[in-house]
Image (cartoon, rainbow, N blue to C red):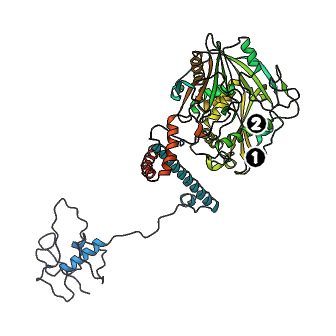
Amino acid sequence: MDILVAPYNPHGWGPPDSPVAPLLPRSDGSTPGGSAASHIPFSPFSRSDKLGRIADWTRNTNFTNPPRSGAGRDAVFDFALHDSAALAAASEKDSSFRLVDGKPPPRPKFGPRWRFQQRPLLPQRRDEEVEARKREAEKERSRRDRHYNLNRSFVAGGGGQGPNRRDAPTLKSSVDIQPDWTMLDQISFSTFSKLSFSVPDPPEDLLFCGALEVYDKSFDRVNPKNDRRLQRFKSRNFFEVTTTDDPVIRRFANEDKAVVFATDAILSALMCAPRSVYSWDIVVQRVGNKLFFDKRDGSQLDLLSVNETSSEVLPEAKEDINSAHSLAVEATDINQNFSQQVLLRDGNKVTLDEPNPFASEGEEIASVAYRYRRWKLDQDTYLIARCEVHSVADVRGQQGFLTLNALNEFDSKYSGVDWRQKLETQRGAVLATELKNNANKLAKWTAQALLAGADLMKLGYVSRVHPRDHFSHVILSVIGHKPKDFAAQINLNTSNMWGIVKSIVDLCMKLNEGKYVLVKDPMKPQVRIYEVPVDAFDNDYMEEPLPEEEQVRPPIEDEVVDTVAKNQAEGEAIDAEVGVGEDDANKDASDSIS
């Protein structure tokens, strides 16, 4: 080991001007450049520069790895290197070296880690996801087909105005428009939506007819896990009597008790007209200074619509169990049977002022009461309507009247909500779906309950035992609602309801004596008023619309149907038109989505 010689400065502090011995001799004992240590580097700096360190006492000078090229910030203090090349290599190695913490990040000692991790789906959940994707794909496919067929019909018929919900052949008029009918006026639904009228006085009860059975409260505990099989009551008779055939209304008309006469079914159809999609018709008779609102025998108003306001298209074949007509017949039958099953059929009935005016002696009739009520529309106009209630029950310690109606589920793939799974946990979602698909039907039931002054309206949820069996049903749940609260929930404005009735009454009172028909247009949101012969709809008038090829329809409908059939036989022309139709369909689809 070489012992270094410390220089001594006899003239003052600090190292002498010329050291007496080399500060860092080489290993062979020689000193380059004479006695001075010329190999020690010197790095110029300014006063603004920050000095890292004067000397590095921690550096290991006995390294054997060859250095890399580059310049490091500590290379100027590497006194163990002999020449500038070695100095440059060391500086490069220092610059490329970075300290990296190789330890894993600390894990939390507490708290579930599974919350932040994505677990694989269970087999059942995976199957549900697959089925949901299949249903969405099927809905999207049917939606594209509907747009394609709709535009194909539009192109064939020369384009123009048409339905925005279904293609033209789907919706038909509820009554065949004859050539000798004269159209007097047409009113758009947008006009109805702006009307408002408040009845000045509460209604007056004139007469109560019929007998009522008590509601069975055990049905309030029915749920999907404890359902009830729906029974059939074929022996009980249900009456659908129009206004002018009612002997009580005739008696009131002879006594001049009012000017306008109607039933709750007819008034509810007028009040909820802006929500309707299917065609319906009401017969208006002006006799002297009196006005009668009637319905035809076998009218569309006698049936309950199903999925009327839904965006999904029902099968068009009338014999299909899921067609609009078949579902309407099924829903009407379910509603009647449900209204009788939820009663205490022990023979005890609440009798009212008079017996049922339509029943024969010894005939078994359904539990129903007819409440004849009178409203004052203005100083000289009074309206009498026959309203229905179906049962009585104890409501807040007093006898209250109930209306009983049933919603029916025929196939969950059309609604997207399975009642058996959602009724207990997501009852609001089920009701919201029904409000979307059956807005008109629920609004009419609510309007009838308000007209009848019912204290409670019971809604039953009835489903098929199997989606392909339309004869067997089960009751899954029964839920009660207050009519006023439910009307507010479904956004049914009573002032707007009476405003529509008041405007129709004022319009019809200006007409001459005769018979008229108020028809909801099957293609557009509007109603038309036709003047018809006095003997129209008499002598077993046609209950159903004529075949499509025999009907007198609006011109655009006939043009669409005839031109489509003609273009299908031609070939090349229809191919060109279909290409244009596809472009328009895509544009319409994008507009509707946006």
Secondary structure beneath dot 2 equals: helix
Which disc, if any, is residue 336? Answer: 2
Q: Is residue 148 above or below residue 24?
A: above
Which disc, if any, is residue 471? Answer: 1
542 relative position to 436: left or right: right
- Picture quadrant where residue 344 is located: top right
Q: Are marks 1 and 2 in contact (CB under 8 Å)?
A: no
- Picture quadrant where residue 494 is located: top right
Q: Is residue 31 above or below residue 403?
A: below
Between discs 1 and 2, the one toward the N terminus: 2
Q: Residue at x 25, y 77 (%)?
A: 90
Label 1 amino acid?
Answer: Phe
CA separation, marks 1 and 2? Answer: 14 Å
Q: Does any portion of residue 396 appear in the rendered image?
A: no
Spot occupied by residue 238 in the image (x, y as percentages of width and height)? 78, 32
Spot occupied by residue 31 in the image (x, y as percentages of width and height)? 15, 85
Most foreground residue, 168 or 91: 168
